[in-house]
Image (tube, rainbow, N blue to C red):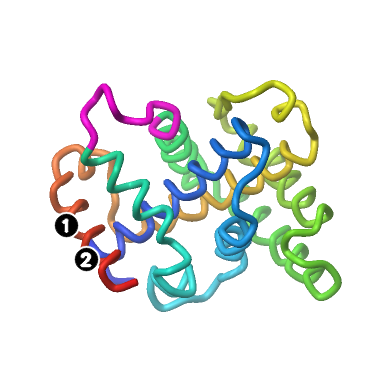
Amino acid sequence: MKHTIRDRCIALAGVFQACALVQQIASRGSANSAIIESTLETLFRFDVSSSEDVYAGLANISMGLRTLREQLTSTRNDRDIEITRYVISLLILERGLSRNKRMLETITTRLKETEASLDYFSLSHDNIFARLGEIYKDTISTLGPRVMISGEQPYLDNEHNASKVRALLLAGIRSAVLWRQCGGSRWQILLGRKKYVIACDRLLAEI
């Protein structure tokens, strides 16, 4: 896969999109179902030729591109600290996952088993959310440190919402893996902020 700023920007936007959806569910109790589905679909695209193909088009990552741009262009006081915290947590967890080949194999196997269930259930079915949530709970959440989710307690206590959140965090990890494969690093974000903003603008203009 090419290591271009375009590819890295798309992949990083995938992480931000998953985290923004998690924030909405935790604070409002819901999020756009179509965007949730397109985000979760990335978990089942195993063999792709480009980062854009992982998301099946730029339109499916537009929320993430806008969120990424807003975070990069906001002042420290205006930046959404929650989303930043979630993103950093996922990038740290992905680094731990990248060193655990057995866990990577387990996740891939279980995702393929879940994919077979899509012949009977839609991606937005409770059973699929539950299965994806269990994959995250049994694997990524054991790596530590855990992603601490902030929000309204009634929404956080709802098991259906909890499964959605875990499923979206798993999708965020998938995008974090892609970002690293494209040559992404945290130093790159700090030192190359302007390049990412320009890439976001160009990608959004294509939608």
User: Which residue type carries mark 1?
Assistant: Ile
Q: Position of residue 7 (x, y in %)?
A: 30, 65
Taking depth in this image into account, of 132 and 95 the one nearest to the observer is 132
Instruction: Write down the residue under mark 1.
Output: 198
- Label 1 near label 2: C-beta < 8 Å? yes
Q: Is residue 3 visible?
A: no
The CA span between labels 2 and 1 is 6 Å
Quarter where residue 38 is shown:
bottom right
Q: Secondary structure at mark 1?
A: helix
Q: Main secondary structure of the magenta part?
A: loop
Quarter where residue 78 is shown:
top left
Q: Residues within 10 Å of mark 1 (few under 14, many from 20)?
A: some
Instruction: Write down the residue under mark 2.
Output: 202
Q: Position of residue 123 (x, y in %)?
A: 72, 63
Q: Position of residue 206 (x, y in %)?
A: 29, 73
Q: Residues within 10 Å of mark 2 (few under 14, many from 20)?
A: few
Quarter where residue 204 is shown:
bottom left
**Which residue sits at x=24%, y=25%?**
76
Q: Position of residue 31 (x, y in %)?
A: 61, 47
From this view, report whether residue 133 is shown above or below residue 47. above
Residue 87 among magenta residues: no
